[in-house]
Amino acid sequence: MSIVHSDGLEQFQQDNATPHASRVATKWLQEHSFDFRHFHWPPKSPEMNIIEDIRDALLHAVEKRSPPPRTPMDLLTALQDSWCEFPPGYSDTSRVHATSF
């Protein structure tokens, strides 16, 4: 965390899914809690994290493109273009739905 966030503002976020809340993971988090801030969220609360919804919305937008991306560079361009086409503040909503786009 200190390598990626050298500014000291690192925060750890997890969804508390069963594998992420195992004894081993919980022990590691406790042992390293001084290295970063950890959000304590309710178990299995996907609505707390919109990353999966944004990923789905991007995937849906790219799948609708014509012609479809054929190379990794085409895919990168399609993802960037699709992201730029999202309405302003799209990622600031409390819950994004791929079907709303």
Image (cartoon, grey):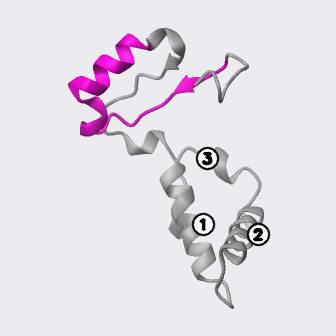
Whole-percent x and y of residue 43?
30, 33
Q: Which residue is mark 1?
A: 58
Circle 2 residue: 81
Please report the residue visible at 68 percent of the width from the left and 16 percent of the height from the top.
Answer: 8
Is label 2 in a helix, a strand or a loop? helix
Q: Which residues are magenta?
A: 9-32
Is residue 76 within the magenta segment? no
Q: Label 3 neighbourhood size at 10 Å, few (<14), some (14-19), many (20+)?
A: few
Residue 30 colored magenta? yes
C-alpha gap between disc 3 and disc 1: 15 Å
| Residue that appears at 26% across and 38% down | 19
- Is 52 displayed left or right of 5 in the figure? left
Pointers 2 and 3 in contact (CB under 8 A)?
no
Q: Which quadrant would the N terminus be assigned to in this image?
A: top right
Residue for point 43% across, 44% down:
47
Tell me, for residue 93, which label it has, or none: 3
Image coordinates for residue 2, horizontal then vertical, percent? 62, 21
Q: CA distance from mark 2 to mark 3?
A: 20 Å
Residue furthest out toward the bottom: 67
Relative image position of residue 92 (x, y in whole percent): 66, 44
Side (left or right) of 38 relative to 93: left
Q: Residue furthest front?
A: 3
**Is 76 or 54 nearer to us in this picture?**
76
